[in-house]
Image (cartoon, grey):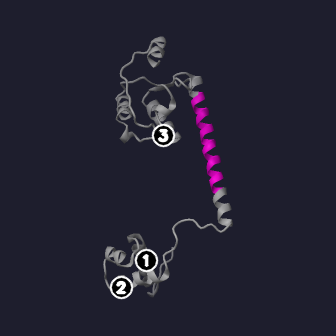
């Protein structure tokens, strides 16, 4: 189908890029065809990128907008057959930008709904994040650190994560600093 569009439009097909069996949601590093396309655009070997549908290029709005910005910065346009968008025309650029505005609006609505849902859940007493480490365990961590054991050894012997041990060690250092005569407050 894209071959017919190219013929009708007078475009010369330079190369066909594909990532057979790889989702458009994957990043550039997992899509060798997409990566090759972007390299060809960077080398200015391509004047227009034609794709069957926007989801062949990517699934993330930010990735798609970034992709369009990148190719247009190199003087390359985009044609999407299913969405009837051709950014080589003023109306196509306008339509693509309008789609971007609506997608950004949709993302903002989703974000506000998530925040409202979290606030509702918190007001009903739902706790977020990991449960706190029991004070008795933190005391064991402090004691082991005071004995000079390594972070990993303390984590293994007390059954807490190395991040918890490091956080406890930092808090112990802060308490020791606060006991000094001079405390700088920023």
Residue 55 located left or right of residue 39: right
SS category of the residue bearing label 2: helix
Q: Residues within 10 Å of mark 3 (few under 14, many from 20)?
A: some
SS category of the residue bearing label 1: helix
Res 36 → quadrant: top left
Res 6 → quadrant: top left
Q: Is residue 183 above or below residue 82?
A: below
Real-space Cα separation, disc 2 to disc 1, in angstroms:
11 Å
Q: Which residue is mark 2?
A: 146
Per the rendered image, the range of residues in magenta is 94-115
Whether the magenta-drawn stretch holds residue 96 is answered as: yes
Whether the magenta-drawn stretch holds residue 108 is answered as: yes
Q: Earlier in the sequence, mark 3 or mark 1?
A: 3
Q: Which residue is mark 1?
A: 168
Name which residue lies at 36% across and 75% down: 155
Q: Is residue 115 above or below residue 36?
A: below
Image spot of residue 7 (x, y percent): 45, 12
Image spot of residue 24 (x, y percent): 45, 36
Magenta segment main secondary structure: helix
Find residue 63 and name its label: 3
Q: Residue furthest front?
A: 21
Q: Residues within 10 Å of mark 1 (few under 14, many from 20)?
A: some
Real-space Cα separation, disc 3 to disc 1, in angstroms:
39 Å
Evaluate if marks 3 and 1 touch, with contact meaning CB atoms under 8 Å apart.
Answer: no
Find residue 45 and name its label: none
């Amino acid at each position: 189908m894209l071959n017919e569009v190219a013929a009708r439009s007078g475009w010369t097909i330079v190369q066909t890029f594909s990532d057979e069996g790889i989702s458009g949601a994957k990043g550039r590093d997992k899509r060798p065809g997409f990566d090759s396309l972007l390299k060809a655009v960077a080398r200015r070997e391509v004047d227009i990128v034609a794709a069957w549908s926007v989801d062949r290029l990517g699934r993330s709005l930010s990735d798609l907008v970034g992709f369009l910005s990148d190719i247009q910065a190199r003087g390359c346009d985009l044609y999407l057959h299913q969405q009837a968008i051709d950014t080589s025309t003023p109306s196509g650029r306008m339509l693509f930008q309008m789609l971007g505005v609506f997608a950004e609006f949709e993302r903002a609505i989703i974000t506000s709904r998530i925040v409202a849902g979290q606030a509702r859940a918190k007001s009903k007493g739902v706790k977020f994040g990991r449960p706190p480490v029991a004070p008795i365990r933190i005391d064991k961590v402090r004691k082991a650190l005071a004995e000079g054991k390594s972070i990993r050894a303390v984590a293994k012997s007390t059954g807490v994560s190395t991040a918890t041990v490091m956080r406890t060690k930092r808090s112990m250092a802060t308490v020791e600093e606060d006991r000094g005569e001079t405390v700088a407050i920023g």
